[in-house]
Image (tube, coloured by chain):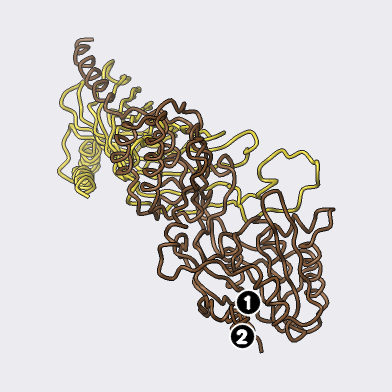
Chain colours: A brown, B yellow
Amino acid sequence: MRHLHKYIFALILLFMAASCRKDIPQINDPGNYISGNFGEVFDSYWTGMNNNYVFWDIDTVNWDQVYKTYKPLFAKLNLYDSNDVRKGYTYFKQLSAGLVDSHYDLSFKDSWLKDSFSINPAYQRKVASPDYHNPIDIFNFYDTIPHHYLDPGWKRGFTNDVDKQYVAVSGTIKQSTLYFFFSAFNLKNLFNTDTANGVKRVEQYFFDKLKNTPNITGIIIDVRGNGGGSLADLNFLIGQMIGKQLDFGYTRSKQGNGRLDYSPWAPAFVTPQPGARNITAPIIMLADAWSVSMSEITTMAVKSLPNGHFVGERTWGANGPLTDNKNYNGGQFSTDYINLVYTSSLMLKYRDGKIYEGIGFPPDIEVKYNQAAFDAGRDLQLEAAIGLIR
Amino acid sequence: MKHKLLFFTALLLCLNAASLKTQAQFEIGVSGGYDKNYLHTSTGYRAFTKYDALSGFVVGIPMQYHFNDWLAIQAEPSYIQKNYEQSRDHFFDGIFQKTTNTYIQLPLMAHFSFGGHQLRGFVNMGGYGAYWADSRIKGAMANVFNSGPDLPNNQQVYNYFQFNQAYNYNEKYAFDSRRDRRMEFGLVAGAGVEYLLHCKYRFFVEGRYYYGLSDQQKNYMINQIPRYNDTYVIQAGCLFSIKNIFHHAHEQEVKTAE
């Protein structure tokens, strides 16, 4: 006990040093903020992006700088002044302009913005690019292709959902090459529904031909202008044409609140379906700058086949799968003010190790959009695909 | 880099000290034990997600230099695991990741002892530096591309793996130099008892607490949630004076010759 004071002194030193830890900040769910003023509106959005956005690893936007620049600007705005609401909309557009996520879409609940478009940075970039062109007219697929390129007996059909129309066309070229166009990925749902619909009839025709055509010389899957949709369609469609699991890339999600907190890369693959026919003839994806999301994922999967090809243009560049943010601890969210921050839940890396988010997946054989040829009733991209099949 | 260099220089000096001319006050030994590491952090608003402590082990080479009968300075270059687990529950039960972190650590402590000649109590207090040498991750996550068999309509679902099946992994963690801070500094405190056997071997058991003061992450983002290691160790070991051992051996040789 002679040295008790020395022990006490050492203990005091230890306790003083122990106070050097940083405090753990309170991170709130963006959905729980009360949008009573623009400061809170900005904080809820910025926080949600800070923790949920899945592309911070590759995104070049300096999110800390966004906070420093825009926090004071939003703080000056009045939520109950329509001019300020318009100004706030412009700020949101500016600060999100460089985000690499090409699914990204920002829509608002504010009634003063109900006539405004949602903010879609990838679309803004697309419109501003020198190669920009409108999507190919749906009548090229629905009318021109069947009449000019398909053998007699082709099928086409459409069905209307609450807010969407699905169109599909299928037929043969020189009797042994199968052609299948569909405007969006909802094939499995539409096929399994009890209600008869135009798309289901076309799907049935295509699957019958896939099963029964004796010597298939090629398959052309046309996803030009296809905005994507259900991931379940990957197995449902491509799983009918392969004999074994087809690995084509990897995905990862957020695993913590930090911008760089990621899960490991999990393999992305297509699973063969019962009764599948292992196609060894060329399978050609036709895709263009308006082929988005599932169209790109399907193109990547097919291009991974030894007999897979991709003809057309570089795709849109939105490759990350989407689901509810609870499922993968990241991705899309809403706030009191923002209807939806629509953003990917996972990051996709192709089998070559590259991430094509924001830049699009490149074709093997590039054939640019040609409006003059379309006007003349010719589809040069389809012709290039047909040319690959001997 | 500067920190890393300093740390390894200190480590080398300590190891080198063992090979210098031994002195009566200098003791060296071995130690080993069990540890449990708690990650001091927060999951923020992540749904159904938590962090748990995990066990590991530690082995070290304690070295003591005695100034007098109650005070010594102790260094103990060690290999220590600071492990933890992140897991999800309820509908996401089964999703987890166990992280096994290996540190090369150098605690430097004041060693205060008290009590009798053979059986003594002691308290260690000081600081430590550690280098995060390696990390492995093992776990299961849902794989969005592995949907598994279709679920029949109107069937209740009990686990997220019924939608997206599990991807099981066990792999080396790839450090990210933008985020991971591989040098760790902190405080250490411990207490135990030691028993002197044959005036040569000092056996001890000790409970020790390592309190990390360095965030495992560099400051790379606003509103960053820090991560600190809190490590509890129970260990045992033995210290001996090299000079005493050789001195006795020399005496025995002389006696045999006589």
The answer to whether A39 is drawn above or below residue A278 in the figure is above
Q: Chain of mark 2?
A: A
User: Is residue B119 found left or right of A353 in the rendered image?
Assistant: left
Q: Is residue A24 above or below residue A381?
A: above
Residue A344, given in percent of the width and then of the height, sits at: 52, 50
For mark 1, does the 10 Å Cα neighbourhood hold few (<14), some (14 to 19), or many (20 or more) residues? many
Q: Secondary structure at mark 1?
A: strand
Going by the numbered disc 2, the residue's amino acid type is Leu
Q: Are marks 1 and 2 on the same chain?
A: yes
Left or right, residue A143 beside residue B53 = right
Badge 2 element? loop
- The reply to whether dot 1 and dot 2 touch (C-beta < 8 Å) is yes
Where residue B59 sits, quadrant-wise, is: top left
Q: Residue at x 72, y 62 (%)?
A: A236
Residue A259 x/y as whole percent: 40, 45
For residue A388, which numbered disc appears in the image?
2
Q: Which chain does the residue under circle 1 lie in?
A: A
Spot occupied by residue B111 in the image (x, y as percentages of width and height): 24, 25
Q: Check the image and name the residue furthest to the bottom.
A: A390
**Classed neighbour count for the residue bearing mark 2: other residues with Cα under 10 Å, few (<14), some (14–19), many (≥20):** some
Q: In this view, which residue lies farthest toward the top? A: A1
Disc 1 and disc 2: Cα gap in Å? 8 Å
Q: Residue B29 location in percent, x, y?
A: 30, 38
* Of residues B208 and A272, the one drawn nearer to the viewer in this rendering: A272
Q: Nearer the viewer, residue B207 or A375?
A: A375
Q: Earlier in the sequence, mark 1 or mark 2?
A: 1
Q: Where residue A284 is drawn, which disc sits there? A: 1
Question: In the image, what residue occupies the spot 25% across and 41% down?
Answer: B249
> Which residue appears at 20% of the width and 23% of the height?
B71
Residue B234 is drawn in which quadrant? top left
**Number of marks in picture:** 2
Which amino acid lies under the numbered mark 1 shown in the image of this protein?
Answer: Ile
